[in-house]
Amino acid sequence: MRINYFVSSSVLLLSLVFCQETYSQSLATGQEIQYNPITTAVPFLTITPDSRHGAMGDVGVATSPDASAQYWNPSKLAFVKDTFGIALSYTPWLRQLVSDINLAYLAAYYRLDHLQTIGASLRYFSMGSIQLTDQNGTNLASVSPNEFSLDFSYSRKLSEHFSGSVALRYIRSDLSGGIGLNTYVPGHAFATDVSFFYNKNFGSSENDQSIAFGLNLSNIGGKISYDDGQNKEFLPANLRLGTTYSKELDNFNSFALSLDINKLMVPTPQLTTGTTNTSGAVVLPDNNNNMSVVSSIFSSFTDAPGGMKEELQEVNYSLGAEYRYNHQFAIRGGYFHESQYKGNRQFFSTGLGLKMNVCTIDFSYLIPIHQNNPLANTIRFTLLFDLNIFHQNTKKQDQGKSAVPAS
């Protein structure tokens, strides 16, 4: 029997819905707009995984370090204060349409000494369940496509205020949900991140104010293929730059303001969908998939058909703010902007954070300006655990026992 809908085509439709660079826009009649979004494989790698930074408009490359820094900028972990921490995040996806698509994220770090920290994270994207039928509409099987990545990082202070990090990542993308069709196979790829972080305190009193800068080159690696190498697609290689200004108002109140700019380092499509050749046939965009990864990274800053004007349209920016009271309660807000010609994601976000003894709970909520965001009106949450407190409590108990004289 012949399967009515090829699995990869079904999942491609889902991918076009959640891909951060491929939201469609209706254009006014007669309006000449060069709508030319950039697409890549495994776009789940670009989804903001945690609620704290999601509430701040997707900023994070230069914010204060926590366990989620493994995604935003692993070099921040060199400045983390605690010895050991874990973060667990859950993000519903397209919740207004379906209930079984989601992103789960687990991250952890361990500080080896005052100079070195190691980190790791696991990201799992479930695309839900897809029912396969034959040409007569008879149910054949139910498949569950999914993707995941596993990475490890090493961060080190290079000076009192400056740190660097390298991360290695393994990526697996199974769009068939475990059922092999023709030559279709799950895709595998390896990538690396290189990041840097600078943080400097200043002001009338020590730690009164601080300024931080961050840079993260992420997902730099080989291409991924779903047909044994016959066709290869680019990973979402990305450049993220940002800064954060923080100020302690008094012993209880503090705030931080952050700015991130973000650009995919992959080729810009050279033809717009719907362009016709001399024979009248429709020509799809040329994504330059035959170009090498190194060449594509460098050319991505100058290859837009519209010149520098279009290159600037490919730069997204985020603004975020965070207010903290007594290091236990936080209120956050942010704004994200993407050009209408490159996807038109524009939204506000907000959220709260509550720190307890060993656990911090963060919530975020996204408010889209244009109704094309899969996270529209969805609550996300993150749990962060400071396991260093357990170690301190155990140490105190051991000291207390040793102080009790034997009977």
Image (cartoon, rainbow, N blue to C red):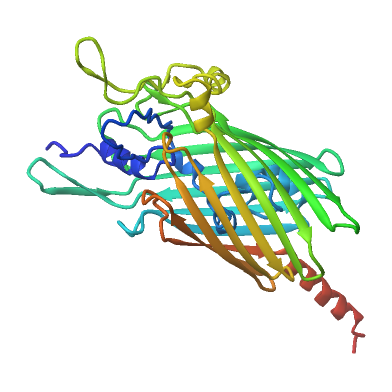
The answer to whether residue 362 is seen in the rendering is: no
Q: Furthest-bottom residue in view?
A: 407
| Quarter residue 302 falls in | top right
Residue at 36% x, 58% y: name it.
Answer: 95
Q: Quadrant of the N terminus?
A: top left
Residue 71 locus on image (x, y percent): 60, 46
Residue at 91% x, 59% y: name it.
Answer: 205
**Which residue is nearer to you in this view: 205 or 93?**
205
| Quarter residue 406 falls in | bottom right
Residue 4 locus on image (x, y percent): 15, 39
Residue at 81% x, 68% y: name it.
Answer: 250
Tell me if 15 is positioned left or right of 182 in this view.
right
Residue 14 locus on image (x, y percent): 32, 44
Relative to 231, is 171 above or below?
A: below
| Quarter residue 56 falls in | bottom right
Query: How many labels sit on residues?
Result: 0
**Which residue is nearer to you in this view: 248 or 89?**
248
The answer to whether residue 279 is seen in the rendering is: yes
Relative to 356, is 54 above or below?
A: above
Residue 5 locus on image (x, y percent): 19, 39
**Which residue is nearer to you in this view: 179 or 7?**
7
Q: Furthest-front residue in view?
A: 30
Tell me if 229 is positioned left or right of 54 in this view.
left
Tell me if 146 is positioned left or right of 59 in this view.
left
Relative to 105, is 397 above or below?
A: below
Q: Quadrant of the C terminus?
A: bottom right
**Which residue is nearer to you in this view: 390 or 39?**
39
Q: Furthest-top residue in view?
A: 278
